[in-house]
Amino acid sequence: MHTIEPHYGWRTNYIASEDPKSPFFGYQNSEVFFTDQIYNFLIHPQWDNIGSETLFIKLLFVDYDEGFAIIELFGEWNDLLQNDIMTLKREVIEVMIAEGVNKFIFIAENLLNFHGDLDAEDYYSEWQDELEEGWFAMVNVREHIQAEMSKFSIDQYLVLGGKLNDLSWRTRQPKQIFLKINELVSRRLGM
């Protein structure tokens, strides 16, 4: 797991630790020391710690004028034991909503597992209510994670599946990805 790095191809366009509006402003990632782990496995030091034992992220890009953010997920999203939805919402999403971001793209190909909890649904509902005209979309979600999210009805709050699960995003610029996903989401939501 320590060899799985967050996408770094857009660092010339955006670095969250240098953005005063970012929840990671001033955050220091080690270049050489492995400081975080998921269970007993060390993870690459470039992943950002949000206060969860199993879920780490990388805020890859934010466009405040267009109101969108691209966030790469890594690890295990565990609402059952860790209440990761609350942690992610309070530590990252609420900060970004306050700055005018209302469209969130989650890159989920490095999300290895999801454990749902019926009690966590209130947080997803709260998220949706706070977005106004916005949305949450998940790209390249593993089949077993999508099934688990559907089992707990999380898929009613997040747009996932279909063409979003076969999206080549690494070779595109952030604005291109946003426009493509916005088109797919708008069609799906009938906007």
Image: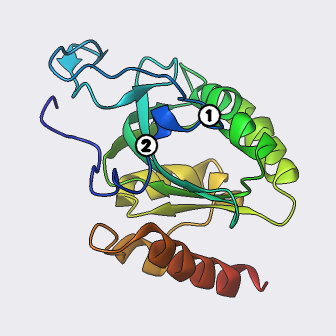
Indicate the position of residue 89 as horizontal and vertical percent values.
68, 34
Query: Which of the colour schemes (rainbow, by chain, secondary structure, one colour) is used?
Result: rainbow
Label 2 residue SS: loop
Indicate the position of residue 101 as horizontal and vertical percent values.
72, 53
Q: With 164 as the anchor, is 79 left or right in this view?
A: right
3D distance between C-alphas at marks 1 and 2: 10 Å
Label 1 residue SS: loop
Amino acid type, residue under disc 2 in the picture? Ile
Q: Which residue carries the number 1 mark?
A: 20
Give the residue at x 79% y 84%: 191
Q: With 108 as the anchor, is 2 left or right in this view?
A: left
Q: With 50 as the anchor, is 168 left or right in this view?
A: left
Marker disc for residue 125: none
Q: Quadrant of residue 36?
A: top left
Rendered view: 98 above or below 188: above
Q: Quadrant of residue 90?
A: top right
Give the residue at x 23% y 25%: 43
Circle 2 Cα neighbour tier, 10 Å, few/some/many (<14 / 14–19 / ≥20): some
Amino acid type, residue under disc 1 in the picture? Pro
